[in-house]
Amino acid sequence: MKRVFLFLVLLSLLASPLWAATVTQTQQSGTQDTWHNGASTLASNSLVLSNAVTLTNPGHLYAWCTLTVPMSAAPAANSAVLAWFRVSTDGGTTYPDSAAQPASSPDMTFPLLAVSGTQVVTFRVDRMPVGFFKVYIKNDNTGATINTTWSLKCRTHTLTIN
Amino acid sequence: MSHAHPHHQLVRIALVLLLVGFSVTPAGAQYLTQSDLNPQHGLMRGLLAWYLVQPQSGGATWWNILGRYHGTLTNMGAGSGWSPTARAGWGGEMRFDGSNDAISLGNLPIWDFSDTTFAMAMRFRTTSATTQTLVAFRTTSPGSGGYFIRVNAGGSLTARLLFDGASTLADYTTAATSYTNGQWHSVIVVFRTDSTVVANNDLAMYGDGVVDQVATTPTATTGYRPCTVVVPTCALMLGTTFDGVQPFNGSLDDVWIWTRNILPAEALAYHRQTPPEYGGMVLPDVPLALVVPAPVVKRKVVIQ
């Protein structure tokens, strides 16, 4: 019985937070892909639907995204660029309606500063879509136009523990 | 409980240590969406809205994590709206300037809450010794109908149910007067409305997780009337009344609305919730949970 006890105590120590602190966590990263290349301007409160995104390295769980937007003027305070995933569940044939702003909360929010010039904002996506998707992007209440050329680029990644 | 063999007790202690050790998972700051919530959590029952300032929040809309009835930032210019917070782990706070800042939750029939029980919760921080609205579905004209929760100039809180005459249906104030001390506080008010029987209209107030209420005897002559009966355009507002009076000067966060009663234990549970898992409301990050070898360990727990 003592051996069982000692074994379990040893095992519990291995499972403790102290042990967790010694675990190596690494980010397995894909390459950066352009999810949308803004070849046209995007006026305040306008939306644009990207082409279907083709990931160079599919299968990752997360992504870090970078939005680069040259603004025509200083955006209004508390304004942002929003983005929603439009996921196709049938392999890229059918996508959700994109005639109007989705009713759900956005999958990505890029808050903008009320300053003029080009802004570069990042966002961490906590759950990548499965399979084929597009991105629906809104210039939300900035009061300014997003000039060309702007872009949304993302690098997928997965956290692994060794 | 029978007398256990001392060795068995030791084994049980070891097993507890073992399970606790393996259940500790590193928690990252998630950007919460509806799919991150735990549908089995008790506070999910009847939950209509959860407005939370998250680390990556921004823009002109305060999104309801549950997907509907989003809030619109109004008059929130530089220095207002999304702001960093000193609270460890929290994503930020929503700052109101005490002048004209507000968040409109819309002129929607869902906010009428006639002949039903509903509850509202929020966290707030203020140092302003003025009468300030936290949430209101009313105007300040007598007889607007509706309901509200406010901070009083003396540091207490008041919640009321109204009808279409000059008086109140239910009127409670907290005994504590420390709600303007610049610290974060929580308030939950449960409203019960009845459009016909005056006496059935009632409130329950919780300050910082515990019951805190002193009743005033109402003198209403008819039952509850929603604000939209008197003012058809009336909207549910955070930080002001619908007519822009008694503006809030401080910060709000973590606003919840339920379509049911909230029990004392639940009020305390809400008060104690902290990020990143909010008392179990948010499911652990899936990929991290997958790497924890808990299932393997559980198979070994068969010793008797």
Image (tube, coloured by chain):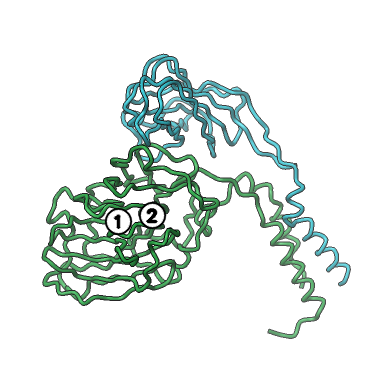
Does residue B268 lie above or below A22 as drawn? below
Q: What is the quadrant of the C terminus of chain B in the image?
A: bottom right
Chain displayed in green:
B
Q: Position of residue B114 (x, y in %)?
A: 21, 62
Label 2 crowd bin: few (<14), some (14–19), many (20+), radius 10 Å: many
Q: Is residue B12 left or right of residue B226?
A: right
Chain displayed in cyan:
A
Task: Say what amino acid the circle numbered 1 marks.
Answer: Val
**Closer to the camera, A61 or A123?**
A123
Does residue B232 lie above or below A148 as drawn? below
Task: Say what amino acid the circle numbered 2 marks.
Answer: Val
Tell me the element at label 2: strand
| Chain ID at mark 1 | B
User: Marks 1 and 2: in contact by CB < 8 Å?
Assistant: yes
- Residue named by callout 2: B255
Residue name at image x 69 percent, y 51 percent: B292
- Residue named by callout 1: B135
